[in-house]
Amino acid sequence: MSTRAEIVICGAGVAGVSAAYHLVVRRGVRNVVLVDERPPLSLTSAYGTEAYRNWWPDLTMFRFVSRSIDLLEEVSAESGNAVGMNRRGYVFLTGHRRHVTELAKEAEAVSRLGGGALRVHHDGGAYQPSRPEGLQPDLTGADLVLDTETIGRLFPFLTDDTAAMLHVRRCGWMDVPSLGRWMLDRIASEGGRIARDRITSVDTKNNRVTGVRLESESTIETGKFVLAAGPLVGEAGRMLDLDFPIFMELHGKIIVEDTAGVLPSDAPMIIWTDPVELVWGEDERRRHAADPDARYLTEPFPAGLHIRPRFRDGKQTFLGIWTYDVSPREAVFPLAFDPAYPMIVLRGLARMIPAMRAYFDRADALPVDGGYYCKTPDNRPLIGPLPVKGAYIAGALSGYGVMGSQAAGELVAAHVTGGDLPDYAQTFSFDRFDGLSEADMADMRDATRGQL
C-alpha cells in the first residue's frame, strides 16, 4: 500500500514531535506524518530531569535555548500550564568560600550574554524565594547568597558547612509527558498524524528524497524527510548513506520514594558544585581503601551532583542525577547501568543532604532509568538540511533535548518550509564539520561543554 505525505518525520521523541508541532500547528503544513515503531516520547525523552535553564557559557547556545524557553512559556500560557512548567530555579551550592569567586564569575559571564543581573546578598533582606508552581516571580539573572544563616533558613536540610549559594532564576522543569500529549493533540487537530511503524529505507532519485519504505511493507511518497531519531539518528542516517559526527554518553538517574521526607516537595533543582567524597563510616572506608576494585569509592568524584523533587503517580519522590562517567559509547538497548550507581549517588547526596543516610540500606532496590546524550564534538545540535535534497536533521540534542526542543522544532520547520532563519542557524549545520579529520574533531571535543 502506498500513501503520500508532504513531510515525513522519522522519530516521535520530543525533537520529532516538536518539529511536527511547528510544521503543522505553527506553519500550517497539514499532511505531515510522524513515523515511530515505539509510542511517542518513550525511548529517551521521558527519562531525563525534564528541566530547563537559560544558563549557558556561550552566546550561541544561550540564544538558542533562551528562544526555546520563550516558546515553552508560550505553550504554558496557551495550555493553561497543563504542561506543569515552573520557575523554581537552579540552586548551585558550594562548601568552600574560595569557590564563591568562580560562581560570581560564571554569573557575570552569563549576565554579559543577556541572562540578567547578578544580585549579591550579604543578608537575606532583599532575596526573593522562588515559588513552587507557575512562572512567578518573573526574575532573570541570579542571586548570590553569602549569608549562611539565610541559606540555612531557606534550606534547613542542607549540610551545615554550605558556604554560599547561587540561585539562577530562569530555570525550572515541566511535565514532559504532558507536554508531549498537548503537542500531539494539537498536531492531530490540525491534520498531522502518527504511524506506528518502522522506516526501513529511504527512496531517492538523482540525490533527492522521493519516499520512505516501512516495515509493514507499505510506502509513503514524499519529497521531504526529517531525521529526528534521537540516539538512533546515526543508524537512521545510514539509510541516506550519511555518517554523522556524533557520539553517545549514558546518563542515568535514581528515583527514590521520599517516605522519610528528606527533600521538601517545593525545593528547586539543587546542584553541588564541589568534588564529592562519598559518605562512609570509618570501617567501610578502610575496607574499600584496602580493596583494589573498590578503592575508587574512597576517592573524590567530580562535581555536578543534582537532585530535585518530583510528584508523579501519587507518590512524592526525588530524582538523583550524577554523571561522573562521560566516556563515549554505542547506543545499546535495553540500557544497562552500573549496579553501584544508586549507592554512589545516595552516598554522594549525603555529603550535601545528611538525612540521605535514611536510604543507604535501600540503594540496591532503587529504580534507575535514563538515556543517551547524543552529542557532536562541539556539543551543539545538528539542525538543518542534509546533502541529500529534501532531507533534514533535528538531532544531537545532547542533554538539552527537552529545553531546546521548541527552538529545534522551530528551526528545522523554517528550513523545511523556506522560512526566515535566525542568525545562529549556520552554527548548527551539518556541513560545519566539512574538511575536519577525526583527529580534528577529537581535539575539538569538550565532553562537558555547557553541561552541568
Image (tube, helix red, strand yellow):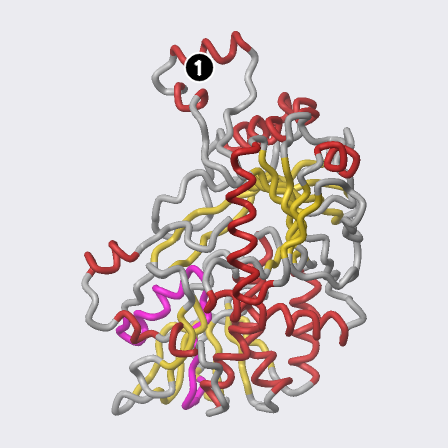
> Which residue is at the far front?
122
Give left or right: position of 120 versus 100: right
* SS for callout 1: helix
Residue 355 visible: yes
Front position in the image: 267 or 283: 267
Report the residue at 62% width, 85% height from top: 26
Front residue of 181 and 49:
49
Residue drawn where x is 61% and y is 39% of the image: 93
Relative image position of residue 46 (x, y in whole percent): 60, 56
Left or right of residue 239: residue 188? right
**Taking the image as drawn, is residue 4 in sight?**
no
Q: Which residues are magenta?
A: 220-242
In the image, 301 versus 321, the foreground residue is: 301
What residue is rendered at 66% in x and 22% in y?
357
Neighbor class of circle 1 (other Cα within 10 Å; few <14, some 14-19, many 20+) is: some
In this view, the residue in front, 402 or 353, is 353
Q: Quadrant of residue 259?
A: top right
Residue depicted at 30% across the width and 63% down the height: 245
The residue where tag 1 is placed is 288
